[in-house]
Image: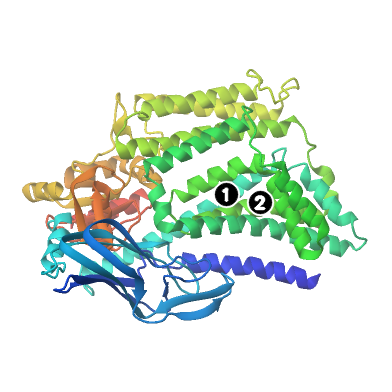
Amino acid sequence: MKTILYRSLMAVACVLSCVAAVAQMPRGVDPVHVKTNIEVSGDGSAVLSFAMNIDGKWHVYATDPGEGPIPTTLNIENKTGVELVGELAADREPKSTYDNAFMSDLRFYEESVVFSQKMKLTGDYHIDGYLEYGACNDMSCLPPTAVNFKYDGTVSTPVAEPESDKENAVSAVVATDNTPQAGSEEAVVAEEISTAVEDADDSSLWMVFWLSFLGGFGALLTPCVWPIIPMTVSFFLKRTKDKAKGIRDSVIYGISIVLIYLILGLLITIIAGPSALNAMSTNAVFNLIFTAMLVVFGLSFIGAFEITLPSSWSTAVDQKAEQTTGFVSIFLMAFTLALVSFSCTGPIIGFLLVEVSTQGSIVGPAIGMLGFSLALALPFTIFAMFPSWMQKLPKSGSWMATVKVVLGFIELAFALKFFSVADLAYGWHLLDREVFICIWASLALVLGMFLLGKIKMAHVDTDEEVGTVRIVGAICSFAFCLYLIPGLWGAPLKAVSAFCPPITTQDFVVVDNTPHAQFTDYDAGLAAAKTQGKPVLLDFTGHGCVNCRKMEQSVWSDQRVAKILKEDYILISLYVDDKTPLPEKIVIDDKTILRTVGDRWSYLQRTKFGVNSQPYYAPVDADGNLRAKPYGYDENVDKFIKFLEDGKK
């Protein structure tokens, strides 16, 4: 049994080390450098090639890598006058080795490799598409990466991408993009703030953990989980005369719960990858899907219907657990718990994963599932060690159904937040601030009336007397409703400003002291700065950026800050998630194509400052040169004022 317990602890440690390794992976890591080219011969033959230089211990998988990894594939989107000859091939044989993670022999390339596709051309030709590949090292893998290409010409004229075209494309992004040179004061300043922003992101991961831990605690109080705790602990303690063995089995059971949910979070990270998770934050389709998910989950919690997995799944796993022994049996029992309790835990997990995924953090889903599963697993371990404590637990009853209803209202409220992100990014104006506040206030009012027993739910026994806890909950709900009402006339509502649409979407505002950007275009703002002789504050923000709204309502609304921003700066807000299409696509290189206004500002932030987190504030002069150290997310008003004063000097 000691061996089983040791292996269980090692398994958790191994998974956590993988999460830590991924968390330490630098932002914007690009270990594979690809150069595309086409060589055309006079006889009508041609070769399309992709030369890869691969950094460090990274490797790129072959066209037939084996079971599991992402193969290197050539995808042709359009072609005329082109006939492919044979398959995509590499200039050398790949390495082959057994991979413990995929449990099979894998083929890959290290250091460098050239993939080529032979073609036959007839007269004028056109071909465009992309090469897709997967790259990994010993600790982590990147999501599938696409290298775009496009070539036109005739059989008699070799075609190569002119370097001047690339320069013109870059200049089209920003007319005066003075990127800090390595070793310069600006570069040092940018590096310092990059580190500060990363520290802020680390603190946000702690917030993800504690939010998920609270979600797991909420799941404990539901009728699908709470009654199972004493039954499961009693089973482990009674099935053996050895109390120590019963405690060890309970500990292994708890560890198994953590492993199951942690693996779920890691799978989401591996399948989606950081770029896909970040794209979710502003993509209309994803946000509408998230909205629908949360509405369905919320309605299920308030009793409209019940979401359950097929009973045959849990039955099959339960039978398998009875046929096995040792760690496998306990692990399958934990898996059975996950399946049986899905109707209660599923909506909470769905909400947490949606909220965490839209933050774009590569380790967010894993951290979230770690916090959730720890809260879920701890009682099974604690009560196994101290079984007498179970006698003090509240008995199962209608109070658990009440908890479900409260969680359902919370999920319905947050569904609006995700719909609002899509609404803002695409400029639909279907859910402006006053509409959002009205719906939230109504939900809070109805919830309070339910807690007082004034509104009945079919699946909740409300004949019993209203207890102290429900009265306190109703008071909090009514108080929240009253707090929201002044927001209809423009009150900042700092406590929920991160979730509400910005005040600029509201039709009627009595007083608004918060400064707003004079410009949302980089070039126009710099031109105004030259005319007025003022410094510029670049505000890299996003419609779906929660921390950006917090800064605007908590820091910008301060009278001292507002005075400086209005009188001493040209404020330019650049929304990195603005989905307005550019008049023409801007092609930077084979891997970077800017299609929207948001793409343009995101590219500017990454290339000029080496950061892709928002909010991000950079004081520059009228030529775009950095004047002082930029500023990340920090709601300390005095620090922000000092930052603004430094930028003015």
Relative horizontal placement of residue 80, taking residue 355 as reference (left or right): left
Q: Quadrant of residue 466?
A: top right
Q: Earlier in the sequence, mark 2 or mark 1?
A: 1
Tell me the number on the disc at residue 564: none
Type of colouring = rainbow
- Out of 647 and 79, give the one closest to the viewer: 79
Q: Position of residue 553 (x, y in %)?
A: 36, 40
Tell me the number on the disc at residue 375: 2
Q: Is residue 179 visible?
A: no
Q: Is residue 514 visible?
A: yes
Q: Residue at x 29, y 49 (%)?
A: 576
Q: Residue at x 59, y 72 (%)?
A: 103
Secondary element at image label 1: helix
Q: Position of residue 299 (x, y in %)?
A: 58, 30
Q: Mark 2: which amino acid?
A: Ala
Residue underneath mark 1: 212
Q: Residue at x 42, y 43 (%)?
A: 286
Q: Mark 1: which amino acid?
A: Ser
Quadrant occupied by the N terminus: bottom right
